[in-house]
Image (tube, rainbow, N blue to C red):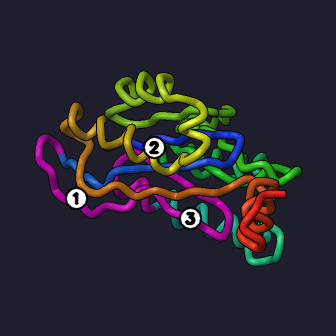
């Protein structure tokens, strides 16, 4: 099936997924993209390849219809409700990353039955059990310092233990608005204010 992992930290969110595609007992590709970004919205999806592609196409259309092309990206809860309808139609599980009303980067887990769950640590797919244990064991400060490295390292370990997870690892990240402003101020004068 494949594996997607995601974490939410005070500094931002990160979503990682592998690129392995398994048909039956055989690996048919190590180049299937299941993590993607759409103007401030990140998505990681697991399921059959055709269902993942269907979800992506329909989700992009619905987000554009909802105003993704405008300056302001819709709130995470609006995005999650759109994703839930599309995930249920396609029969996939997904994790969505975006900002909430106050600019904090946050995650929502979307199940194939249309449920939306808040998520600080999310693992989906064939390596879920392994990944959940690894995510729960993460050092919170280290994860906050580099969420992308945390999810990448977690998924690398899963690939060693789950034959359905492999290929390359794609990572999408989004910083919280207050953290981005803090980083910008630091880069302008070299010191944090």
Residue hosting label 1: 30
- Tell me the element at label 1: loop
- The picture quadrant where one finds residue 43 is bottom right
Tell me: residue 186, above or below residue 51: below
- Asked whether the residues under the numbered discs 1 and 2 touch, taking CB atoms below 8 Å apart as contact, a structural biologist would say no
- Tell me the element at label 3: strand
Sequence-wise first label, 1 or 3: 1
| For residue 167, side relative to residue 49 (left or right) | left
Residue at the right extreme, as displayed: 102
- Asked whether the residues under the numbered discs 2 and 3 touch, taking CB atoms below 8 Å apart as contact, a structural biologist would say no
| Residue 36 lies in the magenta stretch | yes
Residue hosting label 2: 151
Q: How would you rate the neighbour count of disc 3 (Cα within 10 Å): few for under 14, some for 14-19, many for 20 or more?
A: some
Query: Magenta residues, as a range?
Result: 24-53
Q: Relative to the observer, which residue lies in front, 152 or 190?
A: 190
- The picture quadrant where one finds residue 7 is top right
Question: Which residue is pictured at 69% across the width and 47% down the height?
Answer: 11
Q: Tell me the CA gap for discs 2 and 3.
A: 16 Å
| Residue 157 lies in the magenta stretch | no
| For residue 78, side relative to residue 142 (left or right) | right
Sequence-wise first label, 2 or 3: 3
Q: What x and y, as percent, mark residue 157? A: 29, 36
- Give the label, 1 or 2, closer to the camera: 2
Residue at the left extreme, as displayed: 26
Q: Which mark is residue 37?
A: 3
Question: Which residue is pictured at 16% across the width and 56% down the height?
Answer: 28
């Amino acid at each position: 099936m494949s594996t997607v992992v995601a974490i939410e930290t005070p500094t931002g969110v990160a979503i990682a997924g592998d690129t392995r595609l398994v048909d039956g007992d055989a690996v048919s590709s190590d180049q299937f993209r299941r993590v993607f970004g759409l103007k401030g919205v990140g998505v990681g999806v697991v399921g059959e390849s055709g269902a993942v592609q269907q979800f992506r196409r329909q989700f992009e259309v619905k987000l554009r219809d909802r105003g993704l092309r405008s300056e302001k990206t819709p709130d995470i809860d609006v995005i999650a409700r759109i994703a839930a309808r599309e995930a249920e139609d396609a029969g996939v599980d997904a994790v969505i990353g975006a900002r909430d009303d106050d600019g904090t980067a946050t995650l929502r887990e979307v199940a194939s039955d249309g449920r939306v769950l808040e998520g600080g640590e999310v693992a989906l797919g064939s390596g879920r059990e392994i990944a959940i244990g690894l995510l729960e064991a993460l050092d919170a400060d280290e994860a906050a310092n580099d969420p992308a490295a945390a999810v990448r390292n977690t998924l690398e370990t899963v690939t060693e233990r789950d034959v359905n997870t492999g290929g390359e690892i794609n990572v999408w990240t989004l910083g919280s608005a207050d953290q981005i402003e803090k980083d910008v101020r630091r880069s302008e004068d070299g010191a944090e204010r």
